[in-house]
Structure formats: C-alpha cells, structure tokens
Amino acid sequence: MNKKIIIIAAAVLVAAVFAAGIYLFWSNWRKQAEIKVFEKAGEAAETITDSATKGVLPSININLLENKPEVNPADAANPIKNIKINPFE
C-alpha cells in the first residue's frame, strides 16, 4: 500500500511539473509571436507609407509657411493698442 501511494504521488508531481512547463512555454511563445506581429505591422506601415507617398509629398525640411504674407486685418483694427495709461498716477 505504501509503495502504491508513493507511485501515485510521483505521477501527480511529474504531471504537475509537465503542466507547468507547458504553460510557461506556451505563454513565452505567445509573447514572442505578439512581438513579431507588431514588428511586422510597423515594417508594413512604413513600406505602405513609402510606396504611397513616392514623389507626391514635399520634403519635410521645407517650411511652406515661412514666407507667408500678413493677411489678418484684425491686427490693425485697434488704433490705440500701444497706448498705455496708468490710472493710479
């Protein structure tokens, strides 16, 4: 009877260790697969962007609004904007 209990306990222990090993392997494998998916998605997005904007967009170093004219009439609407009066003097 004692030998039978030891064999059953050893089998349960081996099964528990085996199950824990499978769980750890599976969780690490899923994390690596998710990381690879995100890396591939980033590369795919860059490839799509490069092919879609080939020769269409201007260079990023160009500032198109650098030489824009002043066309806002509200800036000159107040003729006494620069007059400062101190009421306490």
Image: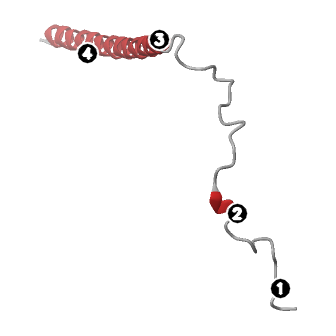
Residue at x 68%, y 30% (from the top left corner)? 63
Q: Amino acid at mark 1?
A: Asn
Q: Give the CA distance from mark 2 to mark 3.
A: 51 Å
Q: Quadrant of the C terminus?
A: bottom right
Asked which secondary structure carries label 4, the reply is helix
CB under 8 Å between discs 1 and 4: no
Residue under circle 3?
43
How many residues crowd mark 3 within 10 Å: few (<14), some (14–19), many (20+)? few
Q: Nearer the viewer, mark 3 or mark 4?
A: 3
Asked which secondary structure carries label 1, the reply is loop
In the picture shown, does residue 7 fall above or below 60?
A: above
Residue at x 51%, y 10% (from the top left corner)? 54
Which mark, by number, is residue 25? none
Which mark, by number, is residue 76? 2
Q: Nearer the viewer, mark 4 or mark 2?
A: 2
Q: Nearer the viewer, mark 1 or mark 4?
A: 1
- Which badge, 4 or 2, is on the more N-terminal residue? 4
- Which badge, 3 or 4, is on the more N-terminal residue? 4
Q: Give the CA distance from mark 3 to mark 4.
A: 41 Å
| Left-right relation of 7 to 70 | left
Q: Residue furthest right?
A: 89
Q: Give the CA distance from mark 1 to mark 4.
A: 85 Å
Q: Nearer the viewer, mark 2 or mark 3?
A: 2
In the picture shown, does residue 66 fall above or below 56?
A: below
Q: Measured from the top left, where is residue 76 in percent x and y?
A: 70, 63
CB under 8 Å between discs 3 and 4: no
Which mark, by number, is residue 86? 1
Which mark, by number, is residue 16? 4
